[in-house]
Every structure is written in structure tokens, then in C-alpha cells.
Amino acid sequence: MGAGLIMVDKTKWVLQTFTSSAALWQVSSRRESDMVNLWDSFNLAWLICPFATGQLIADCYDPLDPNGNITVSFDILQYTSDGYVARVTIQNFYLYRHVDKPGWRIGWTWSQNEVIWSMSGAFATHQGNCSSFKFQTPHSCKKYPDILDWMPDALPQNRSDACCKGGILDAWAIDPSKSFSSFEMTVGNLGGNSTGYRPLNLTLLAPGPGYTCSPIVDTDPTVSSVIGGRREEQVYRTWKSTCTFSSYLANKTPVCCVSLSTFYNAAITACPNCSCGCREADQSRTLCTSQGMSPSDLVSDTDILQCTDHMCPLRVHWHIKNNFLDHWRVKLTISNYNLGRNYSNWNVLVQHPGFSQNSTSYSFNSIVLPTIGVPDEVALFWGIEYYNDELLQADKVQVGSVTTEILLRKDMDSFTLRNGWAFPRRIYFNGENCEMPLPDTFPMLPNGGSRIDPPHWSLLPIMVYLTYKISGFRF
């Protein structure tokens, strides 16, 4: 038996003791036994970390992406009379968390009195006080340089290899070739015969807070292939830092919620009220913000949403559409309630045991991700390039949306429509955890039934016989 911290909402942590088989939840309702069974399948999907003295919440990791991180590397390519030339690479190893607009932003503290003489592929936001340099003006003299990526339309003299993406990095599982960015800089003012000093206190905004970076350390020098792979070349030195994301450090308001529906129940389980903020008392208002501000008070239209009871910019809807003999079909829809923001290169992560079987997504790209210690499979969905890879903004009349149908093969030993098994355990949009409805609000089977089976073709002869018998036909 062990103990762990299981997050049940953004502000509350519940200490829960659990056995190796399942956590035991006490649920008081008319469907108590059903709820216990359902929560048994849910509890391990939450972020779990060992409960020990001095253990911080920031030390937790995401079991859906246990090796995810953003690694920042400094490769010294050559030495100069007073410093060195370095290539800095920002590599996104997160499987489903990408770096969106306005892009990454990194900074550090110089160990000595270094300056940046020149840069290509990125730029320092402030030059600083360079008055002590009489004959050549450095690009930046700041003790704490702040670095941004160039936009794709950067001039040739400002470019370097793998640069100029506006700071946007794709998730590793979606497109590894677009998951990294790099720039070069010439560092000086170190005097002669210096091999360089590791920078200190690396910081990363990607694009907002939430990332914590390890100390920059010496590692094995980077080796790369040239001449078509026939020769290997090695840099002089390599320094690295690993940055990991924590939603608790980011202290973000939820950005999405989940609603549910089925073919066997006309009731729709809506997003929980106030999932991302509460609606204003004036119900006649059609445009709102999650902070409750009036649209007339806003500086930017990107914060304006259609007014809803959940007040989330995004909603993910899971509809159980059909139940066939050996397959079942789901319709997945993502809706954008923002009136001033499109979501480019979006992705949705769905945790559900049904993805252990073969599945087909008709209008999205998809892949099943490897996980560690998670009882249910995790599928990643994203848009098809030039077709639906951009989730368009809403207008005053309708929301922007993208949708697909998913056909899943049944595992006859586990598939059931009872106790909410067919609904997702967790859903993430662009790496952000979406607010789920409580299990006791899920659509139930009609008349308290325990299952709905597809029609069995062996009954067809009997039905035909009875039809002819009733009509008086003689065989």
C-alpha cells in the first residue's frame, strides 16, 4: 500500500491511500456501486507523485508524457581571440505540448563579463550599456540577455540554419522536423585563451510561465554527420539545460471543457458550469470575457468570447454515435468560442481504454502514444495540413469548429456501455487539461438498462416467419 497526491481540481489536493489494484472511493449517490467502478478507472489518469517529506508538487511529472521536456543546448563551434562562437538549439521533446504564438523566449545570466558581439537566427531584445566599447559596438551588453526568434520573413543576413519560425515549435509526436529551432551568436570580452564559461540561471517562456530549467551543465560534445553521413564532426564543448512544464507553476485558468452525448439518450451532458470562469449576471449579454470584463473595456478583441455557462474558450464534445456488432463509432468535435483568435496546429489528446484496439480517424491525423504506468491508452489527434489544421475563430452567430468520426474495434472482453466506460477518462487541448463533467452526470442507459446490443442477424428468419404468419401467408 502506498500514498499519493491526486489532483481533483485546480485548487484542491486530496491525500488518497490506494492499493495496487485500485483506489477506493467513497461515493454517496443512488448509483454508488457504479460510481466506485467508474472512479477506479479514472483515478490513475491524474498526475501522481510520491508523498514524501520535502517533496514539491513541481517534482511531479506527467505520466502521459513521462520523458517530455524542452532541452536547450549550447554548442561551441569555434574559439575567437576573446571568446567563442556558439550555436544554441531549443528542442521540444514533448509529445503533445507544442510552443504556440508568440513563441519561445529564453534568457540567462552571464558568468563573467561576456557580451554578444553578433547574432544570427535570433536577436536580443535589449542592447544594454555598451559605452565602454569604443571601436566596435556589441549586439548586446546585457548581463541578463533576453532572446527572441526571428519571424519567417527575416532578411538573409539575419538568418541561420533551423531558425526564424516565430518561436513556434511543433510537438515531437506530430512533426519532429519542426520541433526545434536554433541560432548562432559570437560571444566575447573574455580575454585570450578562454574556453568559455557556462551561463547561469536559464529561463524559458514558451510562450508563458510554467517552465523550470535545470542548471546548465557540461555534457558530451555534440557529434553531427556531414558529407552525406560519410564523416562525423564534433563541436568543442556542449552545455545543456532541461526545462519542464508545470501547470501549477503556470497557475493557468482552464481553457477548455468537455461535453458528452450518446445515441441512446437524448440528454446531453454539458460542460460543468463555471469551468473556465463564471458568466455575468446579465444573461442577455452575448459577448463576454472569462474575467467578467465588458467587451468595451478591452484593449484587444482576442479576449472576447461568446457567452456560455462554462465560459471556456474551447469545448471538446464526445458523442457516441453507433454501436455495431464488432465496432463502435464516435464523433469528436472541437469548438472555438474565441471571437478574435484562431488556433493553428492544434492537437487533442484523449485517454480511453478503447484505443487499445485498432481505430480509424476519418478527418484528423492520429497516433497512439506510449505511456508509463497509465492503465488506459492515449490517442493524439491533430488536423490535416491545409484542410483543418487551423481551428478558426467564432463570430457572433456561430462558433468555429473541426470534427471527425472515429471507428473503433471492440474488445469483446471489456467493451460496455455501462457505467460510462465509453466516455473518455481525460482530454487535453494543446497540452492543457480540459475540465471534465462529473461521472454522475454522464448520459445513462435508458430504463436503467445495463447494456445495448446491436441487432443480431440470427433473429432475422424468426422475424420474417412471424411477419408472414400474422399476415396469413401460407408456406
Image: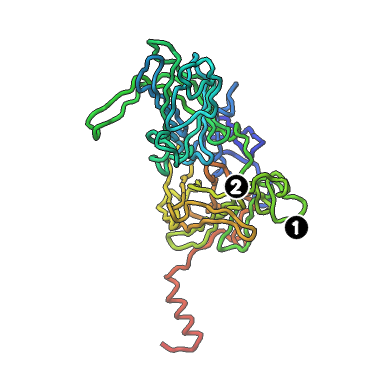
Q: Residues within 10 Å of mark 1 (few under 14, many from 20)?
A: few
- Label annotation for residue 253: none
At a point 42% along the width and 46% down the height, the residue shown is: 368
In this view, the mark in front (2 or 1): 1
Above or below, 69 relative to 32: above
184, 238: nearer the viewer: 184
The answer to the question of whether label 2 and label 1 lie on touching residues, with beta carbons closer than 8 A, is: no
Q: Amino acid at mark 1?
A: Ser
At a point 48% along the width and 25% down the height, the residue shown is: 139
**In the rendered image, which residue does mark 1 sit on?**
284
Return the residue found at the far left: 230
**In this orientation, does residue 259 appear?**
yes
Above or below, 49 relative to 358: above
Q: Earlier in the sequence, mark 2 or mark 1?
A: 2
Q: Residues within 10 Å of mark 2 (few under 14, many from 20)?
A: many
Above or below, 124 relative to 329: above
Q: CA distance from mark 2 to mark 1?
A: 23 Å
* Numbered disc 1: secondary structure: loop
**In this orientation, does residue 33 appear?**
no
Question: Residue 295 location in percent, x, y?
Answer: 70, 49
Quadrant housing residue 369: top left
Question: Residue 147 location in percent, x, y?
Answer: 50, 29
294, 142: nearer the viewer: 142
95, 320: nearer the viewer: 95
Return the residue found at the far right: 281
- Label annotation for residue 256: 2
